[in-house]
Amino acid sequence: MTLNLGETRLEAVQGDITQQEIDAVVNAANSALAGGGGVDGAIHRAGGASILAECRQFKGGCPTGQARITGAGNLRAKKIIHAVGPVWDGGGHRESELLCSAYRSSLQLAVENELRSIAFPSISTGAYRFPLEKASKIAVDTCKDFCSEHPGALDLIRFVCFSARDLKVYSKLLNPL
Ligand code: AR6
C-alpha cells in the first residue's frame, strides 16, 4: 500500500528490516543502546560489531522518545537511526507522546543527515507491548505531519511489517479512501 504526500511516498511492506536497501534503517532500540532481541538483535547480528562499538560512544545511551545515528556496518543502508520507544504501561504514562517523539526524532535526524529515504519497524509493538492499532496510527500520523511540515525533505518513508497481520493494519491507515 502506498500513499503519496507531496513529493514523499509513504509505503507499507511485509519484510525484514535488515534487508532494506534504503538510506536510513531505524532500529527499535533500548535506552542503553546496548543491543537486545527483536529488531535490535537482528540489526546488530546482520550489521556486525561496528554498530555496537559506535553505540557505545553515546555515553548515557539515549533517552526514551529520542534517537541517535550510527553507521550501518554490513547492512545495505547508509545509516542506522536507533530510536527508543516507550514500554507500554497501560497508556497513562505518556506512552503515546513518547512514541510520537521517537518517530519525529528519527525523521529529524534523517533530514539533518541528508538521508532521503527511511525504513521504520513498528517501534515498541514487540517486547515493549504497545498495542499495534494505537502504535501504527501514531507512526503514520507523525510521519504525515512531518511531511507537511518538511515538504520535499524525504522521498520515501517505508513501514516494514514483520507479519501479514501488521501489514494489514498499516495498509488500512495508508489507504486514503
Ligand atoms: N524486521 C522487521 N520487524 C521485526 C523484525 C525484523 N527483523 N524483528 C521483529 N520485528 P521489538 P520494541 C517486529 O521487540 O517493542 C529489544 O530487545 C516485531 O514483530 O523489536 O520496540 C530492544 O533491545 C514487532 O512488531 O521492539 C529493546 O529492549 C516490532 O518489530 C526492546 O526489544 C518491534 O518489536 C524494544 O522493544
Image (tube, rainbow, N blue to C red):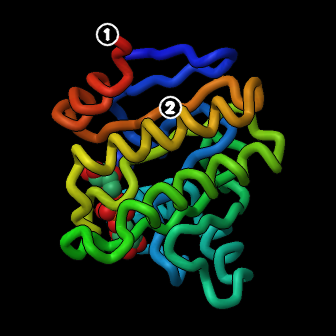
Q: Amino acid at mark 1?
A: Leu
Q: Residue 137's quadrant in the figure?
A: top left
The residue furthest top is: 177
Q: x and y percent of residue 143 in the render?
A: 54, 38
Of the residues shown, which amino acid type is indicated by label 2?
Arg
Give the x, y percent position of residue 164: 20, 30
Q: Are marks 2 and 1 in contact (CB under 8 Å)?
A: no
Q: Which mark is residue 158?
A: 2
Q: Nearer the viewer, residue 64 or 26?
A: 64
The secondary structure type at the circle numbered 2 is strand
Rendering quadrant holding ligand 1: bottom left
Mark 2 to mark 1 CA distance (whole Å): 20 Å
Nearest-to-viewer mark from 2 and 1 = 1
Question: Quarter of the image containing the N terminus?
Answer: top left
Residue 8 seen by the camera: yes
Q: Where in the figure is residue 163, as x and y percent of width and height?
A: 22, 37
Is residue 128 depicted above or below 154 in this figure?
Answer: below
Q: Mark 1 — residue?
A: 177
Image-based side of 2 in relation to 76, left or right: left
Q: Quadrant of the C terminus?
A: top left
What number of labels is visible? 2
